[in-house]
Amino acid sequence: MSKGAKIKSKHLLNKYYSIVILMVFVLIINGCTAKLRTNSQCEAKATQQEKDGCYSGQAFTAAEPDYCTQIVNQDQRNSCYQLVAQRAGKVSICDKIDEDDKRDLCRGIVLNR
């Protein structure tokens, strides 16, 4: 391979890496702003019960347990973790449940699915 071809190849590779880095950055920013939009949508609900339901729905849809942390009602928060654990197939999410019997039930359900 000639010196000119090597330089051209290296230039194309640098361009490729720049494009990939830019795409990753855009995806990260988009994911962060989507979560912020969801949080503000849920916070705009009139009652705490509606807010909790909104966060539970977002957690299930996104299979993301972080939304469950926003739920004030303990029973609904524990149910949220169980649903997300089942959807994601991750028994480790069950560890976030603060009642032993419900945590054990969650683990059993996720492990036996």
Image (tube, rainbow, N blue to C red):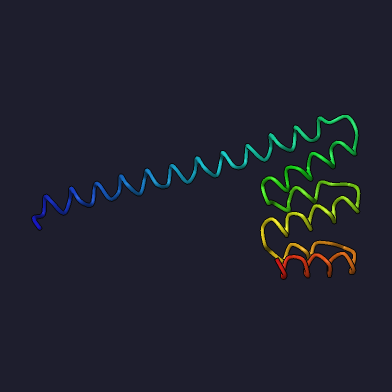
Q: Image check: 11 left or right of 93? A: left
In percent of width and height, residue 37 lies at 69, 34
- Quarter of the image with the N terminus in it: bottom left
Task: Tell me if 26 is positioned left or right of 52 in this view.
Answer: left
Q: Residue at 86% of width from left, 36% of height from top?
A: 50
Identify the residue shown where x is 59% and y is 42%.
Answer: 31
The percent position of residue 32, horizontal first and vertical second, equals 62, 42
33 or 49, which lies in front?
A: 49
Q: Position of residue 17 (x, y in %)?
A: 35, 49
The quadrant of the picture occupied by the C terminus is bottom right
Above or below, 95 against 55 in this view is below
Residue at 67% in and 40% down: 35
**Which residue does the image show at 78% across and 35% down from the upper left?**
42
Query: How many numbered marks have been drawn onto this rendered protein structure?
Result: 0
Identity of the residue furthest to the front in this view: 113
Q: As rendered, which of 97 and 70 lies closer to the eye?
A: 97
Quarter-wise, where is residue 106 in the image?
bottom right
Q: Which is nearer the eye, 29 or 64? A: 64
Q: Residue furthest left?
A: 2
